[in-house]
Image: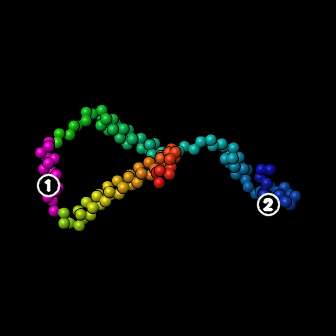
């Protein structure tokens, strides 16, 4: 049925389409070619030289001895805390940041307390025989 025009199927005539033999050979080659696997596009395969340089740099960082930060003295920490306490906080942006951290911590603590109370209530309501005493 190769080379048969699809419009001729109901008419009863087997007319060959006006395609050339070369087109038919190309079509057969294309349809007989089975593709079992498509190579995935990977960024790791895009630039192997860049990847190799990055890998070598990373290995040098890992192999090297880590630099230890100098120890912080108590006097330095006290001075930083003192500066923070007496700092001018009249700037609205600074105050907004401080209030945001305060209320965020407060919200987290209230959520945690609510969760603990609900878990405690759920535990007692399912495991207690004297459920009336809990209410």
C-alpha gap between disc 2 and disc 1? 89 Å
- The answer to whether residue 128 is seen in the rendering is yes
Residue 14 is left or right of residue 81, and the answer is right
Residue that appears at 16% across and 56% down: 85
Front-most of 87 and 24?
A: 87
Compared to residue 120, the image places residue 13 above or below, namely below
Compared to residue 62, the image places residue 5 above or below, namely below
Query: Where on the picture, by quarter, is residue 48?
Result: top left
Residue that appears at 46% across and 42% down: 45
Percent from the top left, x then y, of residue 110? 36, 55
Dot 1 crowding, Cα within 10 Å, few <14, some 14–19, many 20+: few
User: Which of the labelled discs sits on residue 101, or is there none?
Assistant: none
Percent from the top left, x then y, of residue 93? 24, 65
Dot 2 crowding, Cα within 10 Å, few <14, some 14–19, many 20+: few
Residue 108 is left or right of residue 124, and the answer is left
Residue positioned most to the right: 12
Residue 36 is left or right of residue 71, and the answer is right
Residue 115 is left or right of residue 34, and the answer is left
Badge 2 marks a residue whose secondary structure is: helix
**Which is more N-terminal, label 1 or label 2?**
2
Residue that appears at 76% across and 57% down: 18
Colour basis: rainbow
Which residue position is annotated with label 1? Answer: 83
Query: Where on the picture, by quarter, is residue 39?
Result: top right
Query: Where on the picture, by quarter, is residue 101?
Result: bottom left
- Which one is closest to the eye, mark 2 or mark 1? 1
Front-most of 131 and 71?
A: 131
Badge 1 marks a residue whose secondary structure is: helix
**Residues in magenta?**
73-88
Which residue position is annotated with label 2? Answer: 7
- The answer to whether residue 22 is seen in the rendering is no
Front-most of 29 and 46?
A: 46
């Amino acid at each position: 049925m190769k080379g048969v025009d699809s419009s001729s199927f109901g008419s009863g005539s087997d007319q060959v389409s006006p395609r050339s033999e070369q087109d038919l050979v190309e079509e057969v080659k294309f349809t007989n070619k089975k593709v079992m696997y498509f190579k995935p596009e990977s960024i790791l395969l895009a630039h192997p030289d860049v990847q190799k340089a990055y890998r070598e740099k990373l290995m040098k960082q890992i192999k090297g001895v880590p630099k230890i930060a100098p120890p912080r003295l108590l006097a330095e920490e006290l001075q930083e805390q003192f500066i923070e306490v007496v700092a001018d906080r009249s700037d609205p942006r600074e105050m907004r940041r401080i209030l945001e951290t305060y209320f965020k911590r407060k919200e987290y603590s209230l959520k945690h307390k609510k969760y603990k109370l609900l878990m405690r209530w759920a535990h007692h309501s399912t495991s207690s025989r004297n459920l009336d005493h809990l209410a």
